[in-house]
């Protein structure tokens, strides 16, 4: 069925699906490494790209293809490229768009390994990187150098919830001939479609909202331009960070409920944010749905809703944050986010424990910051869990 002219929920269910010879309603798992050619000519046509037939699963596979087509439609893009993980998506994009002597500008509060691989690995190949507060658009403009090729932003950023103006970045990208890449993991295409605001490439850790059930790791890239698509697909296939057919099957199943999961989690998150905002032990809270968020107006212009991620700090600082972790029972103490279950994390004592205090502060990660990913449980239960834990924190 043609779904390009249909609504988002219809696309979630039907886009990318194809009919197999048995009339299978869900897309089957094509668990095969390789595909048989009927004859030498068919093999030749597959390799030349003339027939579009499948050759080998690292290069392409029907189950993976169905997910790539679906996500491309959801992001209003040209084509999708599924990867083994979110980092597989990020490194494929870097590999395709950067080279010796080139420069990338990235958000200061970008996902840690997305920064680490530039500083520790791409630097060995003479790729330069600047990390700036991309919420300050003048800082972005001032960082552009003659060799800048890529402007890479994450919005909302992890875990600071800082928001970057995608349309303003896209204007700078057009002026300076840069490729604008947006990590859209925190919003998912349901809440935010960066390509509509002028981004060239959008990528996700599928592990989070898109799959939504904390049971697989995966990534995906969507481009607007066929030329950029070709370059990134080439890098992904040559580096071998393809998605696996079973992984694709799981994501195809998980993504169908993306909109209803997000609506529900967001409804809960709004209630949780108001509760935390008025709690005497909560020193501050950053949630795009609260007027107190410095960019709540910008959030309204580029996001359909404030989502279900928030960060907050306790008046008791680092130790109170740790005690809160030990006293929650419903919220699960774990990294990751965007699943049906509520997750809580304390970056200063967990994910960012090894990061120097200066780097943490520069990235906006204070010692008291607690990251909260609100799930789809009953809001009353999430709030009562927080109420009890805060009493002991
Ligand atoms: C988790 C995450 C990634 C990395 O994805 P993996 O699937 O863990 O490799 C990248 N960006 C953001 C914003 C993330 O939250």
Image (cartoon, grey):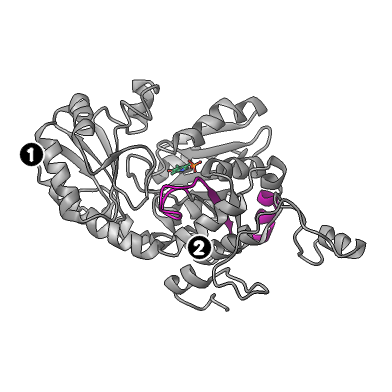
Quadrant location of the C terminus? top left
Q: Is residue 186 placed above or below 316 in the rendered structure?
A: below
Is residue 55 visible from the viewing direction of this image? yes
Residue at horizontal 49 percent and vertical 37 percent from the top: 143
- Spot the residue most to the right: 40
Specify few, some or many for label 1: CA neighbours under 10 Å numbering under 14, 14-19, or 20 or more. few
Task: Between residue 283 and residue 270, name the one nearer to us.
Answer: 270
Task: Between residue 99 and residue 177, name the one nearer to us.
Answer: 99
The tag on residue 35 is none
Which residue, given by chain and number where applicable, does mark 1 sit on?
280
Kind of element beneath mark 1: loop
Kind of element beneath mark 2: loop
Check if residue 275 falls in the magenta segment.
Answer: no
- On the image, which quarter does residue 267 sit in? bottom left
Q: Is residue 183 placed above or below 48 in the rendered structure?
A: above
Using the numbered discs, state the Cα–Cα distance from disc 1 to disc 2 in whole angstroms: 41 Å
Judged left or right of residue 197, residue 230 is right
Quadrant location of the N terminus? bottom right
- On the image, which quarter does residue 376 sit in? bottom left
Mark closer to the chain start, 1 or 2? 2
Q: Position of residue 238 (x, y in %)?
A: 72, 43
Judged left or right of residue 51, residue 102 is left
Task: Between residue 215 and residue 229, name the one nearer to us.
Answer: 215
Residue at horizontal 53 percent and vertical 61 percent from the top: 71
Task: Check whether the beta carbons of the residues at disc 1 and disc 2 lie within 8 A of each other.
Answer: no
The magenta region covers 207-233
Task: Between residue 164 and residue 13, name the one nearer to us.
Answer: 13
Specify few, some or many for label 2: CA neighbours under 10 Å numbering under 14, 14-19, or 20 or more. many
The tag on residue 75 is 2
């Amino acid at each position: 069925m043609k779904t390009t002219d249909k609504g988002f929920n219809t696309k979630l269910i039907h886009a990318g699906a194809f009919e197999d010879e048995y009339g299978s309603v869900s897309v089957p798992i094509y668990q095969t490494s390789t595909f048989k050619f009927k004859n030498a000519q068919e093999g030749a046509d597959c390799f030349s790209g003339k027939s579009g037939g499948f050759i080998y699963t690292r290069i392409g596979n029907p189950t993976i293809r169905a997910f790539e087509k679906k996500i491309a439609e959801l992001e209003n893009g040209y084509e999708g490229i599924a990867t083994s993980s979110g980092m597989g998506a990020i490194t494929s994009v870097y590999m395709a768009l950067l080279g010796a002597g080139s420069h990338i500008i990235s958000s200061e509060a970008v996902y840690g390994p997305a920064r680490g691989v530039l500083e520790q690995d791409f630097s060995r190949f003479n790729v330069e990187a600047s990390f700036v507060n991309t919420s300050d658009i003048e800082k972005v403009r001032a960082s552009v150098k003659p060799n800048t090729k890529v402007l890479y932003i994450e919005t909302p950023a992890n875990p600071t919830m800082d928001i970057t103006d995608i349309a303003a970045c896209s204007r700078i990208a057009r002026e300076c001939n840069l490729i604008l890449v947006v990590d859209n993991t925190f919003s998912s295409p349901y809440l935010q479609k960066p390509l509509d605001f002028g981004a060239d490439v959008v990528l996700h850790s599928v592990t989070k909202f898109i799959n939504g059930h904390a049971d697989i790791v995966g990534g995906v890239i969507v481009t607007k331009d066929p030329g950029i698509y070709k370059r990134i697909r080439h890098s992904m296939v040559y580096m071998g960070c393809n998605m696996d057919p079973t992984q694709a099957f799981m994501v195809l199943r998980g993504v169908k409920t993306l909109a209803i999961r997000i609506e529900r989690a967001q409804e809960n998150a709004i209630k949780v944010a108001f509760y935390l905002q008025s709690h005497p032990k909560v020193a501050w809270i950053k949630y795009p749905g609260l007027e107190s968020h410095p960019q709540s107006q910008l959030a309204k212009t580029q996001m359909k809703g404030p989502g279900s991620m928030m960060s907050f700090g306790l008046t008791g600082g680092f130790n109170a944050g740790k005690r809160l972790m030990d006293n929650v029972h419903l919220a699960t103490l774990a990294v990751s986010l965007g699943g049906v279950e509520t997750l809580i994390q304390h970056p200063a004592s967990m994910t960012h424990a090894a990061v120097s205090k200066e780097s943490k502060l520069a990235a906006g990660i204070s010692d008291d910051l607690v990251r909260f990913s609100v799930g789809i449980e009953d809001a009353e239960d999430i709030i009562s869990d927080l109420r009890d834990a805060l009493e002991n924190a």
